[in-house]
Amino acid sequence: MKIVIIGGVAGGMSAATRLRRLMEDAEIIIFEKGPFVSFANCGLPYYVSGEIANRDSLLVQTPESLKARFQLDVRPLHEVVAIEPDKKTVTVKHNGVETSETYDLLILSPGAKPFVPPIVGLQTATNVHSLRNVPDLDKIMQQITTDTKQAVVIGAGFIGLEMAENLKKRGLAVTIVEKAPHVLPPLDEEMAAFIQNELNREGILVKINDSAVEFKENGQKIVLESGEVISSDLTILSVGVQPETTLAKAAGLTLGLRGGIIVNERYQTSDPDIYAVGDAIVVKQQITDTDALIALASPANRQGRQVADVIAGLNRSNRGSIGTAIVRVFEQTAASTGLSERVAKQADLPVAVVHVSGKDHAGYYPGATDILLKLIFNPETGEIYGAQGIGQKGVDKRIDILATAIKGGLTIFDLPELELTYAPPFGSAKDPVNMLGYAAMNLAEGLSESIQWYQLKEEIAEGKKLLDVRNESELAQGTFPNATHIPLNELRDRLSELDPSQEWIVSCHSGLRSYVAERILKQHGFHVKNLDGAFALYRAVLPEELVYV
């Protein structure tokens, strides 16, 4: 059997090497239009700062190494320019010469390409780049000289923030321009606020609710939608990607969401002898069972292996993806899995939310740092829709656990049952993931009622009053306007100071003490709701609404 693969890197090379392990006699040819068939594209931003010092470290495999170990015919700088499904041939361009190659089965792994917005002056801008591969990286590095002082990153998604961090570490002054209301649009606003605060602390200028509309002076000046003009010696376009499906469209294959390639659960396109994997295909969002484009390395690698299994006769199917991602931004880490609160509500799902603060390991052991976790779930069934995490350390562990829980069909009622490793340097006896389960169960079972940070103003306007149960010393961090203050440990003795006919919202620093206060008050006949995430969360997203003395 002769199998031709178009595109290497994650999906294509995973398919090729797995095919060889299963089908020793197959002829396997990989056409890659770029110079490198296997490279660490997720590592590219870290070479900009020098954190990855050796460029060769980014090159995972070479055609020679793949030939020696797997007997693969890898052909870099070979661009497939046409597919003729009826003839089962592809037209390949190399060094200006076109040739034809036959196939029995064809695997498409063309990946995604940067979305390039229609900005006036972009064609004449000489200092504007995207970053998707090693040649892109080389162009950026050539642009960075001793005269390069000011960099602008357009787009504050995962890659945009990685580039902003590494350009700053390179010594450049960095400005981020983001059209959305906050950085990291895949996260919910209050979680992204912690990352935006970190960017501000590191001296990066962040402009949200704004976008580039024109480049002037060969890209040295950028006109923003707001009318502001900013200077740039180097500009990185990072406003998202779109599936690279030019070949598939020309070949008559069925396309779907945003031009992505439609495949069945066996990765077959509308032509049963042509398969497709990776960033270019439409997948099922596993939680909502709706079409989605999820451009991430882990699903692409999995899909490449699975399509090889299918071709080799093993029983595999594409179950879909939930979208799990992580980014480091200086001293903070942000990670997410599944649906955000915003997306879950857009899908008309019954939604409840809980935030839990904890430590990455036992608080009494030196070096413990804060973690904030958010869980989005169905309050009726306990189904977990998604989770987000912010912190210096240990965020990856917790989001990975929650992603596994979603994939495994666990509910909020299972989270307290998870038995996770514990010793003081590594975790806590009650891990933040366990605590998420407990807090979510309290909501689902009616032991607690909560409001979110964005509901507080409206609740107060409707006549509810806020009770702050923090200690006196904590009030120096800021206070809620017109709040009543009674420290938690004094609450039982001072209940007479509170009007039981009044509806109350209770807050502390992170939400734990306010839950205890809620339980005390409810058992004394008060009508109470807990401010989820409490003062610390509110301060991160709406500091201007607080009073400081």
Image (tube, grey):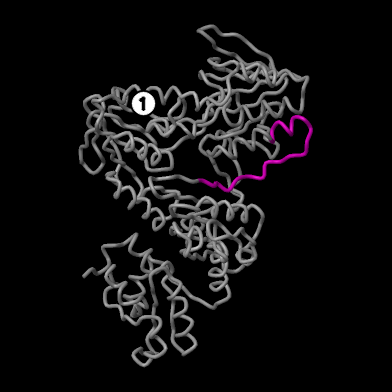
Which residue is more in the foreground, 223 or 174? 174
Q: Which residue is mark 1?
A: 140
Q: Is residue 427 left or right of residue 485?
A: right
Which quarter of the rendered picture does the C terminus lie within?
A: bottom left
Q: Residue at x 69, y 40 (%)?
A: 265
For the residue marked with disc 1, what is the amino acid?
A: Ile
User: Which residue is at the far top?
Assistant: 97
Q: Residue at x 61, y 63 (%)?
A: 415
Which quarter of the rendered picture does the N terminus lie within?
A: top right
Q: Is residue 39 left or right of residue 314?
A: left
Which residue is more in the foreground, 462 or 137? 137
**Vertical side of 265 occupied by 90: above or below:** above
Mark 1 surroundings within 10 Å by alpha-carbon count, few (fewer than 14), some (14 through 19), many (20 or more): some
Verify whether residue 312 appears in magenta. yes
**Vertical side of 327 occupied by 545: above or below:** below
User: Which residue is at the far front?
Assistant: 366
Residue 92 drawn at (x, y percent): 58, 13
Which residue is more in the foreground, 345 or 385? 385
Verify whether residue 158 appears in magenta. no
